[in-house]
Image (tube, rainbow, N blue to C red):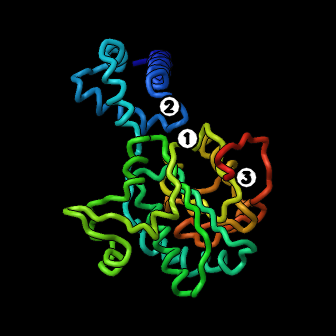
Amino acid sequence: MTVPKVIAHQEKTAQILNKIFILIQNKTGHDFSAYKKSTINRRIQKRMKTCQVDEICDYLEYLHENPDEIHLLYNELLINVTQFFRDPEAYESLKSKFFINILEAKDDDVIRIWVPGCSSGEEVYSIAIMISELFEEMNQNFKVQIFGTDIDESVIRKARSGKYKISSNIHYDRLCKYFYKNGDEYTIKNEIREMMIFSTHNVITDPPFTRLDMISCRNLLIYLESSAQQQVISNFVNALNKDGILFLGPSENIGKFLDTFKIEDNKWNIFRGANSGRMRLNLKTNFLTQ
């Protein structure tokens, strides 16, 4: 295939992809155009194989003829990979080096944390358990508000339920202390669940929460195009209090915002705001400031 033909093929594929995005958005209300095209293409190819369709142009036609497939593709595009205490060393670093400083420096009695892209809630509950342990060690107590958000309403419902089939990455002592057994499931105890506020939210298009002491956004930015990553981090800058903590995944970075954050743990991508908090953008806020 000649270079002009390759370019023409790429342009045609991009046009078809945009039409697929429009179909999904019209059906679900969610726009995936800011997600990395390599990730999107792999997941579309997976659905095409299932539907026994070879060409993306034929798959677009298949979507028009089979509207239920749009929802199946939407579910395929959602990123719902999570677990309790993923990277335990990262949580220990967060707890021992940095979170103690937040508690010692608090000038009010409320700790506010946001976990965007929380999926079914394991990360949110892990942070809550870590905080509860820290309160006990320091003989302190604060009101804690942890906002767990995701675009997928079905995983938010699961997170609210607090019911899980526990895997080996929950230590037995924690399992006994913070869960109770119900058949073949374990349910988070109320003392932890009381910290939670779960809601649907799109981290790209919806306004951020504000007055936050920490944002934990692990392994979500890697799925976004660079421009969307920078937009999201800009919103995080605006959302964090002074000296607020940003906790990213090990393969993520803050890009052009190096002057805005101090690197506190280079291995586990834990950052502290150097100039964050009140770098106000012209954002609308609603219940997110509550």
The amino acid sitting under disc 1 is: Asn
Quarter occupied by residue 122: bottom left
**Secondary element at tag 1:** loop
Q: Residue 1 carries which label?
A: none
Q: State the image coordinates of residue 33 (x, y, percent, origin top left).
A: 53, 30
Q: Mark 1 points at which residue?
A: 202
Quarter occupied by residue 274: bottom right
Can you say whether 213 is above or below 119 in the image? Answer: below
Can you say whether 138 is above or below 48 in the image? Answer: below
Residues at badges 3 and 1 in contact (C-beta under 8 Å)? no
Left or right? Give the position of 91 relative to 51: right
Q: Which residue is drawn at 44% across and 61% down?
A: 123
Q: State the image coordinates of residue 93 (x, y, percent, origin top left).
A: 53, 77
Residues at badges 2 and 3 in contact (C-beta under 8 Å)? no
Q: How far is mark 3 from mark 1, CA to CA?
A: 16 Å
Residues at badges 2 and 1 in contact (C-beta under 8 Å)? yes
Q: Name the residue under label 3.
A: 238
**Is residue 161 or residue 50 the one in the foreground?**
161
Q: Which of marks 2 and 3 is nearer the N terminus?
A: 2
Q: Which residue is drawn at 36% across and 36% down?
A: 75
Q: How far is mark 2 from mark 1, CA to CA?
A: 8 Å
Q: Residue 30 carries which label?
A: 2
Q: Earlier in the sequence, mark 2 or mark 1?
A: 2
**Secondary element at tag 2:** loop
Q: State the image coordinates of residue 175 (x, y, percent, origin top left).
A: 32, 74
Is residue 6 in sight in this rendering? no
Q: Residue at x 58, y 67 (%)?
A: 144
The amino acid sitting under disc 2 is: His
- Graded by Cα atoms within 10 Å as few (under 14), some (14 to 19) or many (20 or more), the crowding at tag 2 reads some
Quadrant housing the N terminus: top left
